[in-house]
Image: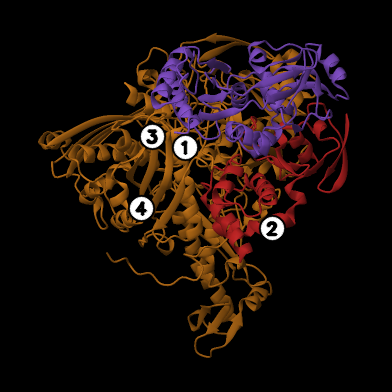
Amino acid sequence: MITIQKYVRAQSLEEAWELNQSKRNRIIGGMLWLRLGSGSVNTAIDLSGLGLNTIEETDEEFSIGAMVSLRDLEMHEGLNSYSCGAVKNAVKDIVGVQFRNMATVGGSIWGRFGFSDVLTVFLALDTYVELYKGGIMSLEEFASMRADNDILVRIIVKKTPGKAVYTSMRNQRTDFPVLACAVSCLDGEYRLSVGARPARARVFRDEKGILAGGITEQSAKDFAQYAGKTVHTGSNMRGSAVYRSHLVKVLTERSLQELGGM
Amino acid sequence: MEIKLKLNGRAVTGSVDADTILLDFLRQKGCLSVKRGCDTSNCGLCTVLMDGKPILSCSMLAARADGHEIYTLEGLQEEAAEFTGFIADQGADQCGFCNPGFVMNTIALLRENPDPSDDEIRAFLAGNLCRCSGYEGQLRGIRTFLESRRA
Amino acid sequence: MEQKKHREYKAVNKSFRKKDSMQLLHGKPVYTADVTPDDALIVKILRSPHANAIVKSIKTDTAKKVPGVVDIYTWEDVPKNRFAIAGQTYPEMSPYDRLILDRHVRFAGDAVALIAAEDEKSALKAMRMIKVEYEVLDAVLDFRTALDNPALVHPEDDWFPPVQVGGDPKRNLVASDCEYHGDVDAILEDCDILLERTYHTKAFNQTMMETFTTYTSLDRYGRLHVISSTQIVFHTRRILSAALGIPKSKIRVEKPRIGGGFGAKQTAVCEVYPAFVTIKTGRPARITYTREEAQIAGSPRHEMEITVRLGAMNDGKIRAVDFYTLSNTGAYGEHGPTTVGLSAHKSLPLYTGGLEAHRFKFDVVYTNHQASGAYRGYGATQGIFAMESIVNELAEHLNMDPTVLRDKNMLKEGMLMPAYYGQIAEACALDRCMQHCREMFDWEHRYPVRDMGGGKVRAAGVAMAMQGSCIDFVDVGSATIKLSDDGTYNLIIGAADMGTGCDTILAQMAAECMDCDVDDIAVFGADTDVSPYDSGSYASSTTYITGKAVENACTELKKQICAIAAGMMEGEEEDVEFVKGGVRHIGSGQFISLQDISYKVQLGNSIPAVATASHSSPVSPPPYMVGMVEIELDKLTGQVEILDYMAVVDCGIPINPALARIQAEGGIVQGIGHTLFENVTYDEKGKPMESSFMQYKIPTRLDMGNLKVEFEHSYEPTGPFGAKSIGEIVINTPAPAIAHAIQRATGVWHRELPITPEMIAMSLVE
């Protein structure tokens, strides 16, 4: 486990940000991933006193504080109604209830982990992140950036009309996914988000217009074949690149069928 | 650093390092029901309730519990006794090392959902590993308890 | 079929709660770490990052200066006599190939140095400051290449086998043998069908929830007092004596409650380290393995590769089996020479019905993997995966219902088993188990493969299993029972309840004998200073062996009680009889209560009211089991969902049916894990990959479907109250049954475990 010299429950985002400018200090989310490291942290910066643990819903969007737990995401009726249960499906198999009570959405998104179900599902939605200094940017842009010393304050999910489906393949039910897959159609635009490739999740769009005529059995199959060729996969303990590419096709086709109401 | 928290209904203070984990702090305070089963937040043996929610005390800094309310099985003996006899009747306690975490999370389940289905029980307790019982006897015990309560 | 009658019991064959249930369920402090003082030195082990290396130099001086560090020990500080840490009866079949710390480290995780510190933080800090220079050697990382590999795991000259088992460390060979019955080659030649298949199983980890943990101190007489989470207090005493070079009389070993063992704690994995520290420093010491240490330096199953040649006729008669087992014992030989034997001895006899000849050849080899040890099933599990799979392959080849094929060939009660030491199956309900399971499972309707649409297929599989009930002519169980002063009893045992409930079932047997309530029997165990000798809890033997000792001790105690009572009535022993609650004079009907007798025991009495009996058995009656599984398999992702696992077990007369059922359910779920996702792999340098619960995935309650276990009784004449064993057999059916169901669903046989979704899906893509 990492060693920590000092613990500070930040009183303001400014205080947290200032502390976070030192490379030896770290913001702690749920601490589930961070604690597995073997390094040494000077000051652990805790954001739990800043009221970032709520999900606020308006007519236009969901504003999800960085310290909201995965369990809160799972249980939030509005978010799951909007996402057709995709958010719940993305988090419900993550270890256990106790774990999900601790893991934070901010930690999951900030970490941009390869295995992240959370990043995968939010990339399929019309999602933005709010950074303390960097302001608001799309999650897609954020996901492609490297971690810096800014602070993730909240995640914003716009209620763009549409539908989403989340599926994953796991060797054992509460394990990391071998592949995570979310598809959505928002305002007529199809998105495919693939995580656990095993590299971090990325969004793929229907650049060839395969789904332009809507989802049919054939177009779902064609898009799945396209995804199988386009999505870059790799190997790790949980699966080979070949198997993952196979799963990209299988999960994409099945998700599209579900999205199309088949 | 000094921390103050409510442990099993009583105010407790303690001096901890920044990286002391709650599990170790609780055992030092005599809450020996709290068990360590892994170091990767995977097994559920160290489950305690923090502000009423089940969490893994192995992954919680003691410092973070400052100002919060913690319950371990030592503080919930009566609530546990409502159903533990039904587990014992199945012989599903077995080695017992996972029992405190399992009992704590079952308490959390029953508070949130007083009449869960089998699938809801399995889903809620999925983070509580048990290598002895094969889980089926634990499920039978909870089910028998629920039936006795309905009767 | 009729089953043998047995009399109605009052205390056995009843489901009592375990005596410790409520303590355990309410989180009371009963385990090693809970019951031992906090002020012990913390012992940590610096482990080798290399699979095979020599410690060229090791610098500990800076590390020793870390505040809180008491001392650091290396290979230079420990005794030079080799020993074995396998919990086995002396002389052990396992080679003496260990030192407490060796200059030659033989797997990634092997102990290099011991750090003793006032607290864990200081110990870990010091660990990082020890400077070791290694000479890295070529490692043996594939057990198929171990024999006669130029890289030697044990090149040392003081390697010593207490029993000759065909080992030769200069060939990386721990044990080797060949045995046969009948002319296998001639019969195979004569068969219509000859199948030859090779099966591979991995070094699965027990993953008991409480890792290895031991506390040591010097007691008030200056003796080494060891409190450890162990299945084997007496063997541990002997092992420590050998390792530390101190007399056994100076050592006391006891166990509190144990947080699971499954065989892992049948090896003294961690006891020597704190014991050494206590001897060196005179101070209490404690070691508790991290989960990572338990994963990489524990005592898991032996990886085996088994090649079976099976000869059968077109009508399904199985006539001959030629069996070769290659077993990987890892870096040290614990349990290597013994586990391998069970691979054939506890699989082939299932087919005694038709089998005319068999041959069994084996080699057990060293590699630079983590040392293997004892895990529930102990070689039988590996052998049964091979044997049951090839029989299923034969059924498929013959297009015959695999349960019917088994009906034709299986062992039946009364048969002499040439492949099982020539013993006779006195109690065998295997045929009834099959019939019962077929009906319960609705085999007829679930065996045919059903397409559920969307790439999903439902299919079923079957397997049989057996095990033993002890190590015949070897295991010794003992029990002491004494009359307490309120007319209740104390039962003192040396067997180890590791959660299985043996304290309770032995008390049930004592209550049956003494015609009293189970609550009237207080059980104590196990402590080498107090308990009568017991080999320990392993080899499925506690019910069968120690149970019989309990029965015998009770008979003796009843005689003593009658003698005391006869004296009180001024009569002779033959004039009185032991009845419920006391002793009755046969002639006069005069009754004296146990309470009164127990007062008499303490007043002017010279007849002891305490009896000890020991028991050993010349036979090891097998329990039997049939398991059937229905799966839903996703042909596109390769995912296997267990829908129902049903099993029927013949463990003789179950002493506590609820506990027997839980044993079966727990064993089945472990078997499901081994079959579908628990994996053990090493990287190219020999570093273990599944070193935590994040990577070594055991089943959760979402992974195991619905279980249903029922029993078929048989009556074992040599067992206590007709009982045989239950603890191990239960892990043996899942792998072959699930592999069978997967083949039914996909048409592909998978002969290596685990059978992962990737293996299934990719086998269907090509």
Q: Chain of mark 2?
A: B
Residue contact at pointers 3 and 4, CB within 8 angstroms = no
From what the image shows, is residue C158 above or below residue C94?
above
Q: Which mark is nearer the camera, 2 or 3?
A: 3
Q: Which residue is mark 4?
A: C441
Residue contact at pointers 3 and 1, CB within 8 angstroms = no
Residue placed farthest to the left in the image?
C190
Q: Position of residue A84 (x, y in %)?
A: 58, 34
Q: Which mark is nearer the camera, 3 or 4?
A: 3
Task: Answer few, some or many: residues within 10 Å of disc 2's Cα (few below 14, many 20 plus, some between 14 and 19).
Answer: some
Name the tint of chain A in the rendering. Answer: purple
Q: Which mark is nearer the camera, 1 or 4?
A: 4
Q: Nearer the viewer, residue C378 or C533?
A: C378
Label 2 and label 4: CA atoms lie apart by 36 Å
Q: Which residue is mark 2?
A: B81
Three-letter amino acid code of the residue under disc 4: Phe
Q: Quadrant of the N terminus of chain C?
A: bottom left
Label 1 and label 2: CA atoms lie apart by 32 Å
Q: Position of residue B77 (x, y in %)?
A: 73, 54
Task: Answer few, some or many: residues within 10 Å of disc 1's Cα (few below 14, many 20 plus, some between 14 and 19).
Answer: many
Q: Chain of mark 4?
A: C
